[in-house]
């Protein structure tokens, strides 16, 4: 598949930096499109992150439940975290598992990368699959209040269907795992 070259469809006339924060920056871009129209685009420049689908040998999936201020809710999620400057993303994934669920993976595999909301944000998340989990706890971040839960694939499906799980990366992880299991069954 051929990619459109960067900047081929638009020209940034000006960029105003409105906010610079620890996790994200906010820019207002004035953009000229090939049609001659000029539009304003709000762009969230967000740090990259990892997310990890941890699965035990018995098939149980580890989710965390934590308070998310932006939506003012406690959410079920697969573990995730920001990549620190200079940190290898795989090391970030391992560290986040140790901090959030108290386990270190014997096997960890990068599966894919995705943008969370490319219409306005640069946030890119690297998705990992972790197995062969063994106890190895690191201290949690001081702003996280995390509870750890273990669910079967069927329980997670039910929680998605009922609206109890609404986190996009967790729903994506569920769909990926179902597809992976279907592939494995076909190849047998």
Image: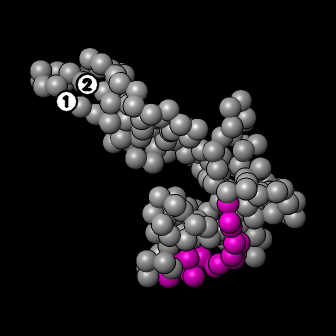
- Residue 34: image location, x then y, percent: 17, 21
Corner quadrant of residue 57: bottom right
Residue 154 drawn above or below residue 66: below
Residue 33 among those drawn in magenta: no
Q: Residue at x 37, y 35 (%)?
A: 43
Q: Nearer the viewer, residue 20 or 185?
A: 20
- Residue 106: image location, x then y, percent: 83, 56
Q: Which mark is residue 30?
A: 2
Q: Could you tell whether 115 is left or right of 9 in the image?
A: right
Q: Nearer the viewer, residue 33 or 134?
A: 33
Q: Residue at x 67, y 60 (%)?
A: 144
Corner quadrant of residue 89: top right
Dot 2 falls on a residue whose secondary structure is strand
Residue 69 drawn above or below residue 147: above
Q: Residue at x 52, y 61 (%)?
A: 69
Pointer 1: what residue?
A: 39
Per the model, the C-alpha gap separating discs 2 and 1 is 6 Å
Residue 153 among those drawn in magenta: yes
Q: Which residues are magenta?
A: 144-158
Compare marks 2 and 1 and give the one earlier in the sequence: 2
Query: Which quarter of the rendering shows the N terminus?
Result: top left
């Amino acid at each position: 598949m051929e990619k459109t070259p960067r900047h081929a469809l638009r020209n940034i006339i000006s960029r105003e930096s409105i906010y610079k924060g620890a996790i994200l920056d906010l820019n207002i871009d004035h953009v000229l499109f090939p049609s001659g129209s000029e539009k304003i685009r709000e762009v969230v420049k967000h740090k990259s992150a990892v997310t990890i689908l941890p699965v035990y040998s018995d098939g149980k999936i580890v989710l965390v439940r934590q308070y998310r201020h932006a939506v003012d809710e406690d959410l079920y999620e697969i573990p995730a975290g920001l990549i620190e400057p200079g940190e290898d993303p795989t090391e970030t994934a391992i560290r986040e598992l140790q901090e959030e669920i108290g386990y270190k993976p014997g096997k960890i595999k990068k599966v894919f990368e995705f943008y969370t909301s490319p219409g306005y944000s640069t946030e890119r998340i690297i998705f990992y699959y972790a197995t062969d989990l063994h106890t190895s706890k690191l201290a949690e971040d001081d702003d996280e209040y995390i509870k750890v839960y273990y669910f079967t694939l069927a329980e997670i499906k039910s929680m998605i269907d009922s609206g109890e799980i609404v986190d996009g990366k967790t729903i994506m992880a569920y769909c990926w795992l179902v597809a992976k299991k279907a592939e494995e069954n076909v190849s047998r």
